[in-house]
Image (cartoon, rainbow, N blue to C red):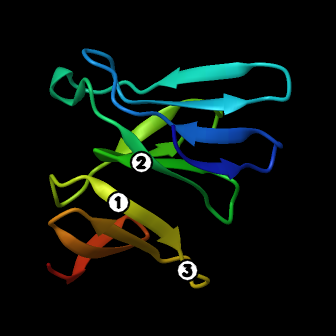
Amino acid sequence: MWGSVLDKRGYLWFGLESRPEKPPAACYWDGEKLNLIELDVEATSQGKSIHRVLVDDTGKVWLAGYGLFRETRGGFGFEEVPCKFDDPILDFIQRRDCTFLIATDGGGLFGMRGGAMTRLASE
């Protein structure tokens, strides 16, 4: 398991290590049981890890690793966020101004605000 975060519902989320021939996944503890969430991704992303879990200021859960995923409105569903890099995400934070900072392994540092992503620094 990678990272952990408590969401506004009181669920404790974890990113999961890669699982051969399985989609990237996270799980959450609801106080009674551990629930698995497998992400709907292309076959090329099978066997990839989720390294970081974040809850933004609106309460949405974000998952980052080999790709970036945000919780959809209905909850417990996730959509992939288009990224300008192929490197795995090592860390992901939200600043007070609602800008997200994304650090990648080899691709540099990116900023994202309102869906627009820009490179802030390279290796």
Q: Secondary structure at mark 2?
A: strand
Foreground residue among 92 and 98:
92
**Which sits earlier in the primary sequence, circle 2 or circle 1?**
2
**To which quarter of the image does residue 76 belong?**
top right
User: Disc number at residue 44?
Assistant: none
Point out which mark residue 51 bears: 2
Q: Nearer the viewer, mark 1 or mark 3?
A: 1
CB under 8 Å between discs 2 and 1: yes
Disc 3 is placed on an element classified as: loop
**Residue at horizontal 57 percent and vertical 21 percent from the top:** 36
- Direction top: furthest residue: 21
The amino acid type, in three-letter code, at marker 1 is Leu
Taking 99 as reference, is 28 above or below it?
Answer: above
Front-lying residue, 65 or 55: 65
- Badge 2 amino acid: His
> Distance of mark 1 from mark 3, alpha carbons?
17 Å
> Are the residues tagged 3 and 2 within 8 Å (C-beta)?
no
